[in-house]
Amino acid sequence: MSVYRGTRFEFKQTQECLPPLNVAVLAGALVGGGHEVRAIDLQVETDHEAAIRRAVESWRPEMVGITFKTPVFNQAREIAAIVRRYAPEAMIVGGGVHATYYPRECLEGTDFDAVVIGEGDRTIVRLADGVPPEEIENIACKRADEIVVNGKKDHDGTICPESSIHDLDELAYPDWSVFDLRRYAGITRLFYEAAPVGFLETSRGCKGRCVFCSRGVYGTSWRPKSPRRVVDEIERMLEFGFREIEIVDDAFTTDLDRATAVCEEILRRKLDFPWCCRNGLRVSDVSEEFFRLARRAGLHLVAFGFETGNRKLLAEAKKGATLEKGRRAARWARRSGITVMGYFLMGLPGETEQTLRETIDYARSLEIDLVKYNLAIPMPGTRLHEMWRDRMKVTHWDQYNFHAPARELYDHPNLDWDTLEAYLRLGYRRFYLRPGYLLRQLGRLVRQRRLGISVKTALQLVLRRGKRA
């Protein structure tokens, strides 16, 4: 038994809207390894520094983990500094997508002692067991006056996250006991039917090659959990107190037979709960029969990444889909009684005002209930970032944000920011302000008792975009 057994481990969460799954997953791995775990989700704390200080001074953790994405890296760096101030002896470990792609930057000039590259389930346990960081694969750490990076490199010199876990059924179950679910009861009813809502992963990785998506932490190797393991995990979540579940896989229906088996197992066990796939399904990996079965099993909302209404742009984005497949998938889901949400990207490579108009018209022609437009952002780790590297104007990570993109981030090859944002607003207006659409949605929302929140959210989308112009 290692002398580090029983180490107290504390997580800081910098970005999630529901109880963060990644923290629960790593907590489960650590508890399974014999360690004590406490978590802080800063999204539900009003005073971050005070919350961190209370935790580290009362608990005195020997290790503190901070998980973060690119847009909140600067916040994560500040959190690490706060931890160092109140727990100077603790090892501070970072992880997530940004740490995977930029391990050196996450360590240089920061209070992080080490960052995990790729999946952390096993790595974090080895760290807590007391294994020296420099002896662990897929990790970067400080040693004396140098930074050691133990990770395989891609052809362009960047770190390539490798899947180290092949059988996901062997993973520990997420430990949701580190969160107080009462703090997550106030969710919007636009997307969800019940609260609290819990995230569920049924697979890792994605075989897609979309130019605007990164390989992320899990890479391009798609690895599923068995249907039995998935539904076992669902039962645990329902017993813990979750009332709705959101599947957050990048590619839940890659194996449609497996996804079908998950639905059949839910029905076999007579589990009655609502669930959704708001992270999106690929339009080429679904069927009408699947949606009918999934609706019976509780699926009430699904999203698709339609991206664009232009055939050429869709093909060049390496989406692996067609406009016809998108139209068909939306029709199948909608006619099965499922609410359908569509995601679109404006500003893809080759975008023009004509293609933007085609995207808006395509969105209006689909059988969907909700639409979300974003401007294409060349996130680290994506092919788009490599293509537009010379067009980037700043390197301030806060600006890599799909929800509030800064016009100072990069120059689009064909369009200026005023034009892109004008079409973004136009897309929302032309979709949501159609008389026929409003009448159909009015009836649906009255039946579902969601009228007030849906109108409020739609107006916020339109007005907020207007203020940004």
Image (cartoon, rainbow, N blue to C red):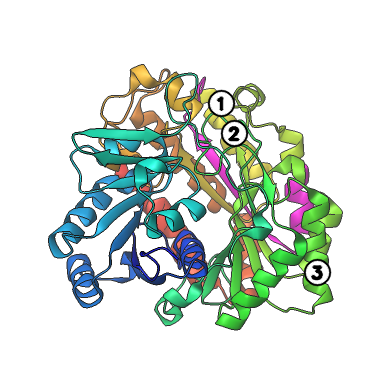
Residue 200: in magenta span:
no
Q: Position of residue 126 (x, y in %)?
A: 44, 54
Residue occupying the point 45% across, 32% down:
381
Hey, which quadrant is residue 107 in on the image? top left
Residue occupying the point 28% across, 43% down:
398
Q: Position of residue 385 (x, y in %)?
A: 43, 26
Instruction: State whether residue 261 appears in this view.
Output: yes
Instruction: State whether residue 336 appears in this view.
Output: no
Query: From the viewer's perspective, is 349 left or right of 49?
Result: right
The residue beneath circle 2 is 308
Of residues 205 and 401, the one drawn nearer to the viewer in this rendering: 205
**Crowd band around label 1 with a 10 angstrom C-alpha radius: few (<14), some (14–19), many (20+):** many
Residue sitting at the far left: 85
Judged by depth in the image, the label closer to the viewer, 3 or 2, is 3
Amino acid type at image mark 2: Thr
Name the element at disc 3.
Answer: helix
Amino acid type at image mark 3: Glu
The residue beneath circle 1 is 355
Of residues 152 and 461, the one drawn nearer to the viewer in this rendering: 152
Q: Earlier in the sequence, mark 2 or mark 1?
A: 2
Give the answer, above or below, for where 67 lies relative to 447: above
What's drawn in magenta, residue-wise? 328-351
Query: From the viewer's perspective, is 316 left or right of 394?
Result: right
The residue beneath circle 3 is 265
Q: Position of residue 338 (x, y in %)?
A: 71, 62
Q: Earlier in the sequence, mark 3 or mark 1?
A: 3
